Image (cartoon, rainbow, N blue to C red):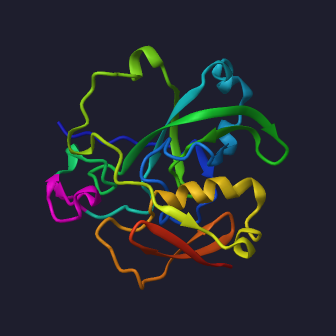
Amino acid sequence: MSQEFTMKTIARIHSDFAGKFGVPRQSGLVDSLEALVVFEPEYRSADALRGLEGFSHVWLLWVFDRAVRDGWSPTVRPPRLGGNVRLGVFATRSPFRPNPLALSAVALAGVEETREWGMALRVRGADLADGTPVLDIKPYLPYADCLPKAEGGFAAAAAGEELAVEIPPELLERVPPDRREALRAVLALDPRPRYQEDPQRVYGFVFAGLEVRFTVEGKTLRVREVL
């Protein structure tokens, strides 16, 4: 029997990424990335967070709101495999799913009270674009959630080598000091689609309110502009 459920947005992420381009492909890859989980007015209760400060990590359950489509396909083309191989959607973390749900394990940097939004969560290593709706938050339990003997299938290892990142000093000065390490780490992960290898193409994304434009040749990424 088919059933439908109504979900409520309990919070939204406030991150440095205006869009999905540039966002790390998995959570935890860039620990220096900080974000704030801001609760919707209905859920701004300190009681709802009581005891959470004792955990080092939490699970965020969220929505691929920038990838919602009508209908679905039983197979997708994972970028990890160059976009040339079709696999079952349930064997991947593709955003194009019957229900566009995602989950991310992030470090809990703090439970804090803000003047504008009340109680909020400061997290590190999130892979969510700014404004992404969060449906639920659960504590990460090491004894149950960490499975050292688990096998990772076609994604068993991290994707590719990190790039060498070159940022001219005059451009780096335009980036706030507390964002520089995170920006370097994001760029080193190679934000480009896996199947694009054009050294002449200029890519760009918005990070911390700045448009960062870059090229990639071989294993070196060069920042060309910071606007």
Question: Residue 80: within the magenta?
Answer: yes
x%, y% of residue 15? 63, 54
x%, y% of residue 3? 26, 39
Q: Residue at x 50, y 24 (%)?
A: 140
One can see residue 131 in this view: no
- Could you tell whether 162 is left or right of 74 in the image? right
In depth, the one of 201 and 45 nearer the eye is 201
Image position of 48 with respect to 162: above or below = above
One can see residue 149 in this view: yes
Q: Quadrant of the N terminus?
A: top left
State how many labels appear: 0
In depth, the one of 22 and 45 nearer the eye is 22
Q: Residue at x 54, y 57 (%)?
A: 186
Q: Quadrant of the C terminus?
A: bottom right
From this viewpoint, which residue is outermost toward the right?
115
Q: Quadrant of residue 117?
A: top right
What's drawn in magenta, residue-wise? 71-87
In depth, the one of 122 and 62 nearer the eye is 122
- Could you tell whether 60 is left or right of 118 in the image? left
In depth, the one of 113 and 217 nearer the eye is 217
From this viewpoint, which residue is outermost toward the top?
143
- Could you tell whether 169 is left or right of 5 in the image? right
x%, y% of residue 204? 53, 75
Most common SS among magenta residues = loop
Image position of 81 with respect to 59: above or below = below
x%, y% of residue 10? 58, 41
Image position of 124 with respect to 48: above or below = below
Q: Residue at x 32, y 73 (%)?
A: 196
